[in-house]
Structures are given as C-alpha cells and as structure tokens.
Image (tube, rainbow, N blue to C red):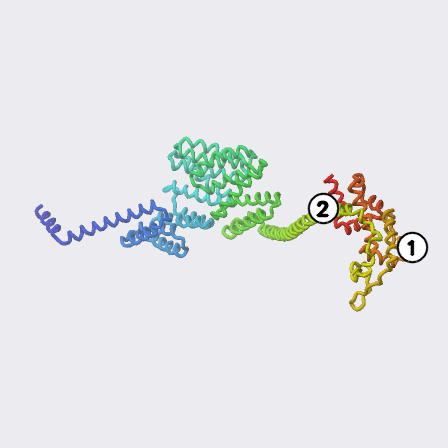
Amino acid sequence: MRGLCNEIHVFFSSKWMYSTIFCLFCACISAQNLEELRQQMDTMSTTNSNYENTLQQFINTSKKKNDKQLLFDGYLRAIKWSKDAVEQNAYCDSAMVLANKLGEDIYWIRFFQTKSFIALVDRNYPKVLENQLKALDFLDPKEEPYLYNKALYSIGATKLYMGNYREALSYFKSATTYFKIQTDLSHVKGYLNCIRSEAICNYYLDNISEARDLLVLGRKAFRYLDKNDSLQENAYFDLTQAMVSFKEEKYQESNELLTNALPEIVLNEDFANENLIYFYFGKNYWFLGNKELAVTYFKKIDDLFTNNEYINVHFLKAYTYLIDFYKQENNLEKQLYFTNQLLTATQSFQKTQSYLSDYFHAEFDTKLLKEEKQKLEDQIARKHLFLVLISVVGTLLLVSFMVLFIRNKRMKKAYRQRYKAVLEQIEVRKSQSKSNKETFDYDWSSMQENANWNSYLYQDEFELTTDLKVKKEVLPLQLMKELNEKLICFETQKMYLKLDFTLNELADYCKTNRSYLSQYINQVKQMSFPDYINSLRVNLLLDDLQTNYQLRQLKTEIIAEKYGYSNRRSFSNAFIKITGISYSYFVQELKKEA
C-alpha cells in the first residue's frame, strides 16, 4: 500500500503529470470546439456570410484532431454548400477516401445520399436515381428497415417525377407495406407519403377509382397525428383528391378541394405544389367556361418559370392553354411570347432530361413549335408594317384635315366678309341709282382727251408689238353718245336676260358694228362684253333677292334660266366672278338673316 502511494506521489510530482493533464485538457477543449462549430452550422443558413468560415474552421480542426468521422461530416456539408463543380468534385473525392478508411456502410450511404441531393438541386434526375440506387445497395432491409424503406420511397418519388409511373408504384407499394405496421409519427408520415404517392401514380395511369380508394384509406391514418400534422397532411390529400376530381370532370368539387389545400401548402413554403394548385385551378375554370379566370392561374405557372426557372413537365400544358386563349383573342404578341416560353422550357427539358424525349415528341413537337413561332413573327412583322403605314397615312390625313380645316375656316371668314361687302355694294348701287344713268352731261370730251382712258381695257384687247401696247383709235364723240342712249334702253328693257345673248345681237340692236360696240364697252364700261352682260344679270338678281323671298327658294337651275343662262355652271361661274362668293352661300346667308 505504501509502495502504491509512493508511485502516485512520484507521478504527481513529476513533469509527466503536467504534460498528461495538459493534453487531456486540450483534447476536451478541441472536442468542445468541434461540437460548438457543428451546432452553429446546424442552426445557420448556408447562405449566411459566416457559414463558409465556420465550415472551413470545422474541417481544419477535424484534420488537426484527426477525427475522421467529423471530417467526413465536414466534407459532406461542403459538397452541399459549394456551388463550384470543381470544388464539389474535390470534396467528393476526399469523402470517398474517408468512407473507404472508415469502412462502415453508413458512410457510403450518407455519401451517395449527399450526391443524390446535389443531383436533385441540379435537376439531373437520372443522376439522382443512380446515387439513390447505390445508397440502397448498402442498406440491409433487416438491420435498417426504416432507412431501407425510406430509400425505397425516395427512389419511387424520383421515378414518379421522371414519368415512370408503373415502376414508381411498385416502390411505393413495397414501402407502404412496411410503414403501415407501426403507428409512431415517423412511420405514419412515411405511410401517408407512400399511399398518397400511390394514388398519384394511379391518377397518371388513369386508374381513377383505385386512386380515390387509396386516398380514402390513407385518411384513416390521420387519427395518429396531432392537429398541426393532420392539417398539413389533409392539405396534401385534398390536393391529390382535387386532381382525381378533375379527371372525373367534377370541376367545382376540385376547386373546393384546392381552395382548402392552398393555405397550408403556402404556409409550408412548398412553391412546387402551390403552383400545382394554380395549374388545376386554371384547368378547372377552363373547362367550366371561365377562360379569362383560368388564364390568370396559368400565368402564375409562367411567373414561376420566369422568376425561379422551375417548371414541372406537366405544367407545360399551361402554355398550350395560354396560346390557345390568345389565338382566340387574335393577340399575336401574346401568342408569340407564350410560344417562345413553351419552346424554351421544352428545349431545356430535352437537354437535361433526355429520358422524357418520347413524351416531348408526342406532346410538344419542337419542330412544329419553331414553325409556329416563325409564322407568328412573320404575322407580327406584317402587322407592325401595316400599323406603321396606317400611322403615316393617318398622320398625313390628320395634317391634311387640319390644313383643310384652317383653310375652310379662313375661307368662311373671307366668304362672310365678301358677303357683307356684296350687301354694302347693293346699298351703294341703290343710293346711286339716279345718277347711274349716263346722259349727255357726261364729259365726253375729257374722255377723249384722257391719254389713259384705255388703261381699263383687258390685255387681250390690245395689239402687242415688240412688247409695247399699241392704243386703239378713239371713237368719235357722236358715236359714243348714240351708243350710250341705245345701251340705256337696252338695260332698262332688260334685254340682257335673253338666253345666250351675243355681241352681234347687241350690235344689231344698237345699229353699229361689233368692233365699235366692243370698243365702247371696253372704254366706257371698263369691262369686256361677257362681263358687262354678266354684271347686269347678277346685279339684277342681287336686287331681286333682297325683296323677293320666294326667289330664294328656287333651285339654282331655275334661277340660271330665269336670268339668261342656258346652264347652271355658266351661271355659277358668272356669279362667283362678279361677287367673289358662290350663289348657294349667298342665298344661305340671306336665309339665316331673314
């Protein structure tokens, strides 16, 4: 006993005691640090800016500690965290080396499950399935029945997504057989997931009655769940039930089930199934005839694809409804947009999920989609060209209209001013009617002596010689007096009202030749013979219109004949030339003032 005490005393008094205690202390601190780091990562989002430093510290500490199990865990975390393919592969290689050294199947299972997760994030479902099957090879159904059947369910879910419904159904059935034998929470949830997935497979295989029966059977297990779990599971069962009701053409019932399911699924932040609800809302309303409302739900599918680059293969059908709707609306731009979206999604699926090539060839012919796209682009180009032409023509028409409007407004103003001037001229002529008769008191001699008397003659009455105007010979005074008397009688008797009255007829009446008469009218009346006759006729008409209200009601043709014109056109031209305004406008204004 004393010897043992002496040995103990020697140990505690030696330098080896302090060295051993220090090593044990450091080991405890190191283990404590690793556990704290792991707990931090468990509670920290991988998007947190500190996650990378914490993870790297965890890996480095595990290496120093030579803790292969924790280092393996660090590598698996790094594989999930890294977004760089080269870096991921490096961590995978390191994890494989450690799995070999550790030697236990559980490490290989965890490794392949991690690789399966990475493939799922990349939406490489064949790779997901490949790694799930590799993990399954390391699971013993007798020693690890729960993990084994959970893996069966995961494989079934992948095959379900890939469209292998019969194969998926067999995996779900095998897992259901195991999960239904126990009533603890994990087994009940496994059972509900499997039986609902069986129902979905039967739905896509058109075994509708079997799908409905499975959902009824599954709901019986809700009694083993607490309130919160029951609400969530009920939402997913309602969603699947809604799909079945749609197949049975019970669209209103399907909508009610979708309405019940939506809040819980949104609360669960399950955006994929949330959009599945929108998809079936759209299909239900489409077949109920409310296509406008259906389109609002189908557009949510497009929003998911545009914003999250996610689309389920079945969601592609939403684009066919959208294209069909806007084809009926004759909206080429919307047709083209959703055709492009469908083409983009289809090509993306064909590149990453070649196993669906037969499905895409049957449902969405890429060649036909491209042809339809080109056709729509050509139609839109023609439409835009047409719109440009319409715009240009419309602009020209508008400018022309504005010019005509302004011109018309100015013309109306000018016409109105001219109308008032004509009325004033009528009044002036009336006031000067007594002095209007030319008598012998007229200073004929001054007329003869005035060198510029013939300046009122029209140019066509002159003979032009080397650009000089040569004056005609002045008429004798006696002849001028005789012609004046004759014309006074002519005007008084209103002989000018005779139809198509000519210069020769007037010359015969005046007993002179037409040359003298024409020269006299040019010199004294300061106008040509046609203008002289027209002025007499128009002035008489203007005077008559002032007092004869019935005359205003007569047609222009009758007025023309009554005042010496053989046709309406010659009368209208004469009236405009004398007054500066049309006959119809003058009469219209007179009627307004009556």
Q: Position of residue 333 (x, y in %)?
A: 58, 48
Q: In the structure shown, which secondary structural element does the residue marked by tag 2 occupy? A: helix
Side of 442 where 378 appears, left or right? left
Q: Position of residue 238 (x, y in %)?
A: 48, 34
Side of 143 where 522 appears, left or right? right
Determine crowd level at label 1: few under 14, some 14-19, many 20+ residues with C-alpha closer than 10 A: few
Asked whether the viewer can see residue 572, the reply is yes
Side of 154 where 511 appears, left or right? right
Q: In the structure shown, which secondary structural element does the residue marked by tag 1 occupy? A: loop
Q: How many marks?
A: 2
Among all residues in the image, which is located at the extreme bottom?
466
**Quadrant housing residue 228:** top left
**Quadrant housing residue 153:** top left
Residue 413's place in the image compared with 246, above or below, is: below
Residue in the foreground of this view, choosing between 425 and 355: 425
Q: Position of residue 500 (x, y in %)?
A: 87, 50
Residue in the foreground of this view, choosing between 525 and 52: 525
| Image disc number at residue 420 | 2
Q: Quadrant of the N terminus?
A: top left
| Image disc number at residue 511 | 1
The amino acid type, in three-letter code, at marker 1 is Lys
Residue in the foreground of this view, choosing between 152 and 338: 338
The amino acid type, in three-letter code, at marker 2 is Lys
Asked whether the viewer can see residue 378, the reply is no
* Residue under the point 48% across and 38% down: 198
* Residue under the point 43% across and 47% down: 132
Q: Position of residue 594 (x, y in %)?
A: 74, 39
Determine crowd level at label 2: few under 14, some 14-19, many 20+ residues with C-alpha closer than 10 A: some
Badge 2 or badge 1: first in the primary sequence: 2
Among all residues in the image, which is located at the extreme front?
441
